[in-house]
Amino acid sequence: MERIVIFDTTLRDGEQSPGASFTVKEKLQVARQLEKLGVDVIEAGFPASSSGDFEAVKNIAQEVRGPIIAGLARAVLSDVEAAAKALEGIKKSRIHVFVGTSPIHMRHQLRKSPQEVFQMAVKAVEAAKGYASQVEFSPMDATRSNKNFLYQILEAVIEKGAGVINIPDTVGYSTPEEFGCLIGDIMKKVPNIKEAVVSVHCHDDLGMATANSLSAIKCGARQIECSINGIGERAGNTPLEEVVMALRTRKDFFGFFTGVHTEEIYRTSRLVSRLAGIPVQPNKAVVGQNAFRHQSGIHQDGVLKEATTFEIMTPSSIGLEEGELVLGKLSGRHAFRERLRKLGFELKDSELETAFRAFKKLAEKKKEVFDEDLVFIVEEKTLQIPEVYFLDYIHTVTGNKILPTATVRIRKNDKVFQEAACGDGPIDAAYKAIDRITGLKLTLADYSLRSVTGGKDALGEVMVKVEEKGNLVTGRGVSTDIIEASAKAYLNAINRLIYRGERLNEREAGKIKAGS
């Protein structure tokens, strides 16, 4: 099988995403991760565009040794010289020269004749060859260029030393069949094309960047220019993770491979997303939150029996530990039982049925049911949670010009404890008073309130999520008074924490006894 060169432009074209901007330090951090990922070429920036880009390219060139480091340059001598200076002193350098070759670009953007553009390209490539170990040339907007002019300019720049010829679909205009034909025609009509590697750089304006790139490979291209998460100008670039995993997953069809360490894909995706400030859409191929999640009961049942029934890639192949069964209203008993087992619950059939009915009822109200919800259901429906702390009395004083204060009296067995505290509001004050009584250091992770019934005297249901030393539990309280419901929910969560801790201690004691 032949190897496909992976050229990553996250730090150059990717940074052109509206709202995305990397600092010099962040660019270096991404470049180091791209090196771990195993990309062949890193386009580190456009040195002539700003002092920041110049510094970033220079720093990356000096500190990242594995991949070839490329700097972009217009077909202008000053740009070529800026790129050369930024890449100075490294062995694996590439200057990437580009100029618009379509009638639209030459007439309206460059305002130059085809002959003037031809000369610009030839002179810039010739100059770049004197500075860098490799030169790449891109006829910008190639897919809307005159083919004969394209063939002529490509032949000329190859003669002057361009070892990589990149064919950009700059505005995402082409289609897979059309783009593949263009690459095929270039392979046939440019006499010296075999002296260079043919590359493609596709944009995703019509959602066909990945398909166009893969079509180009079948027709002779051997380098793909792409970015992490597909970020880039307008609708973005060909996503690296998509082409790499397509080639790996369908090697039976394509017959090519890359040097990318796919286990680093997910980590790289999340790093770029965080630094660029651009979230990955949930249904994004390969790296989206839902890429390995299954909610349909039929799908969940199939995956539990044999993963390949509904997964063509393994989560571990991109650096994830395992896929996830998302529990919702479409989930079945098989997935429900399996998730409970992972949470440490082995239920009898009757207990499972009771818990499953409660789960289905909750799933009708929530889009997704989380693990702490499941623990709450199981403990509430199948286990008797001892009420260690019981709310006996609560009194609050609050107002827009009064410091909110709460007095709380709690029973524990036959003893009564009372405390008062101030807070940001009456509920915060009540929780602080409860903390003083119990002596626990708790973190309120979530608080939600909903009306159980209608009318002015409606019951209010409060759900809280409380964390202590990494243990997260859910508490529930119901009352016509939301402050009372809030206090009950908080105490319910505390009782669950105590119960869970006792169960854990019992299991540990059992293990020790069994071991002895």
Image (cartoon, rainbow, N blue to C red):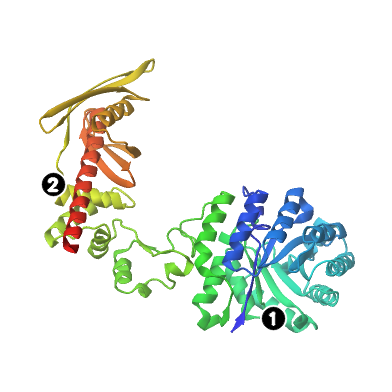
Q: Quadrant of the N terminus?
A: bottom right
Residue farthest toward the left in the current orientation of the protein? 414
Q: Quadrant of the C terminus?
A: bottom left
In percent of the image, x 48 and y 67: which residue is there? 318
Classify 10 Å Cα crowding around label 1: few (below 14), some (14-19), many (20 and above).
Answer: some
In percent of the image, x 72 and y 57: which residue is there? 57
Classify 10 Å Cα crowding around label 2: few (below 14), some (14-19), many (20 and above).
Answer: few
Identify the mark at residue 384; answer none if there is no mark. 2
Measured as percent of width and height from the top left, residue 158 is found at 81, 76
Viewer-closest of 412 and 340: 412
Query: Would residue 287 appear left or right of 194 to someone viewing this image?
Result: left
Pair 1/2: label in front: 2
Measured as percent of width and height from the top left, residue 260 is found at 57, 71
Residue farthest toward the top in the current orientation of the protein? 401
Q: Earlier in the sequence, mark 1 or mark 2?
A: 1
Viewer-closest of 336 and 128: 128
Measured as percent of width and height from the top left, residue 3 is found at 62, 79
- Check disc 2 and report its element: helix, strand or loop: loop
Q: Say if 19 sits above or below 322 in the image.
A: above
Identify the mark at residue 243; answer none if there is no mark. none
The amino acid type, in three-letter code, at marker 2 is: Gln
